[in-house]
Image (cartoon, rainbow, N blue to C red):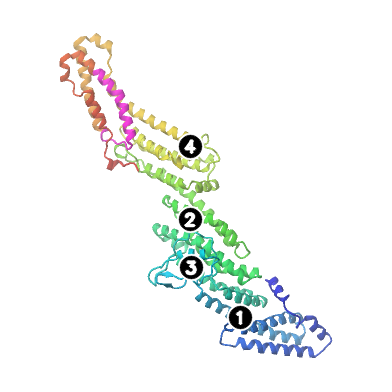
Amino acid sequence: MADDILQIFSNFDGRFSKENLADKVADGDPRACAALDHSLKSLDRRISQFVSSDRPIWADSADAVAFLDAVDELVAAVAEWSQLSTDKAFGSCLARAEDMLQHAMFRLEDEFRSLMERAGESFELTPPYRNGVESVENIPFDSEEEENELEAAVIDGGEEDQIPVALPVTDYDIVIDALPAGTINDLHEIARRMVAGGFGKECSHVYSSCRREFLEESLSRLGLQKLSIEEVHKMPWQDIEDEIERWIKASNVSLKILFPSERRLCDRVFFGFSAAADLSFMEVCRGSAIQLLNFADAVAIGSRSPERLFRILDVFETLRDLIPEFEALFSDQYSVSLRNEAFTIWKRLGEAIRGIFMELENLIRRDPAKVGVPGGGLHPITRYVMNYLRAACRSRQTLEQVFEDYGHPLKDYPKLDDRVAPNSSLSVQMDWIMELLESNLEAKSKVYNDTALSYVFLMNNGRYIVQKAKDSELGALLGDDWIRKHTAKVRQYHVHYQRSSWNKVLGILKLDGSSNGSMGPNGAAKTMKEKLKMFNTQFENLCRVQSSWFVFDEQLREEIRIALEKILLPAYGSFIGRFHTELGKNADKYIKYGVEEIEVKLNDLFQGNIGSTGSRK
């Protein structure tokens, strides 16, 4: 700020030249002190009439000019006389001049505040509502288009005691001046004198107190509440979600419209005095910026429950996209800490997202394998995890960014090193979660006493996993090889189901030609009747049990039935043909099911109770 003062001094004339005064003092000329005293009394009369006046000085432009001229002379005099303060006589004059200067600065401060307040009342960004629509006619815009944009962005908040809420702003490429150009010029002239008089900080404080109130009201009108981190943590999640919506809008409007507009206003009021402009801007915006950052920080350090992921991603992306604005606006010595804090909180949000995925892993691990899903249907954990991951992967680019920064190295994920590209941290994460889910489902399959039912359970859940992964960002991350491998796994479960469930029935129908020949006709017929009876009993039992089982996917259900028909119907038909040969016309009274009836019974399999086993979603 010393440079600012020197710049002003360079514009003053030499009527109180230090060299002139010093020469007279050195010559012992008594008229020097008398001349200074006379000049000081003259300045005192000129300044006092304004300082003691009850009416605003800037109500009359001529008075304002006269007062500023007198202040200029006084500032110059104090600056020059301070060099001669060692002389007792001049020291006394200097003390009087400094006291006069202080009173002049106090009055300038009052005038500065008065101008700010009066201009703010008549030229407010958000003036009182009239007829349900906010007036923006007093706001200067760079173009008519900007005026239309802002007018369209404001709606009535309802009753007078309610906080109005602004409509979403889609075009942020606007800058507004919240004060008239004439007032800005008057403020600049006052600021020049206050900086020159050593009252630059006081001027900045007055300026910032007025503009800070405007910013706080603007955030309030955007619907954003002032909440501490503790208050955010005590809020229900639904309320936090609503607040995040408002925070996103308020952050974009603040960083892209309000703060840049305040920066421009500061630069115009304190033109030529960068230090004063920087200090003023920091003091104006600091509270509102901290309010925005504190909320984001509260979200980042709050609960890491998996259902919070999507809103935290919204906060992360919003803050990430606003980092360039933070860097552009808050880069000077006074406000650089705000830029650094924004970056720190953004990284903390990334850590929170990574923590949420760790919590999802824990949720899968902790899900107990106590009671099997009725009918071997879809387990809720399968639906939850797959739908969750599909939804999460819609933000794939953001998650890639998060996991590139925060993902663990491959060595931290067992069994994945050989099949996942080492440079795809998100792919590693997704593959690892799928490993955990599959291990959990395999453990759950073991609670079924019927081995065949455990394979139906694995088929259902494996098929669901593959279908949810295919044709999605999740599938793209896992890769085609992963899809093919798990499709093959489902086929393998199908084979195991068929073997464990129907091989015994097929074994009954197997005919041993050599043994039948050695028994003779009566022995063979007796054996076949016993086999047919055993088949009927086991077939009926299997159909009764498996008709209550559930296969959620119609195509999979049809594939299982067709596969059973291919192995069972030919074997049964062959057996019945041989049975007719052995028993002749007496065979029909022993045959309970024809081939077509067997097919009908197979079509009743896996219908289950959809309400209890879960449907595909």
- Distance from label 1 to label 3 (Cα)? 28 Å
Magenta-colored stretch includes residue 13: no
* Disc on the earlier residue, 2 or 4: 2
**Mark 2 falls on what kind of element?**
helix
Q: Which disc is residue 108 wearing?
A: 1
Q: Amino acid at mark 4?
A: Gly
Q: Nearer the viewer, mark 3 or mark 2?
A: 3
Q: Amino acid at mark 1?
A: Leu
Asked if residue 257 can be seen in this view, the reply is yes
Asked whether, in this view, residue 457 is left or right of residue 41, the answer is left
Q: Which residue is mark 2?
A: 315
Q: Position of residue 527 (x, y in %)?
A: 22, 16
- Distance from label 3 to label 4 (Cα)? 48 Å
* Disc on the earlier residue, 1 or 4: 1
For disc 4, the neighbor class at 10 Å (few under 14, some 14 to 19, many from 20) is some
Residue extending farthest to the front is 144
Q: Which residue is mark 3?
A: 218
Q: Which disc is residue 479 wearing?
A: 4
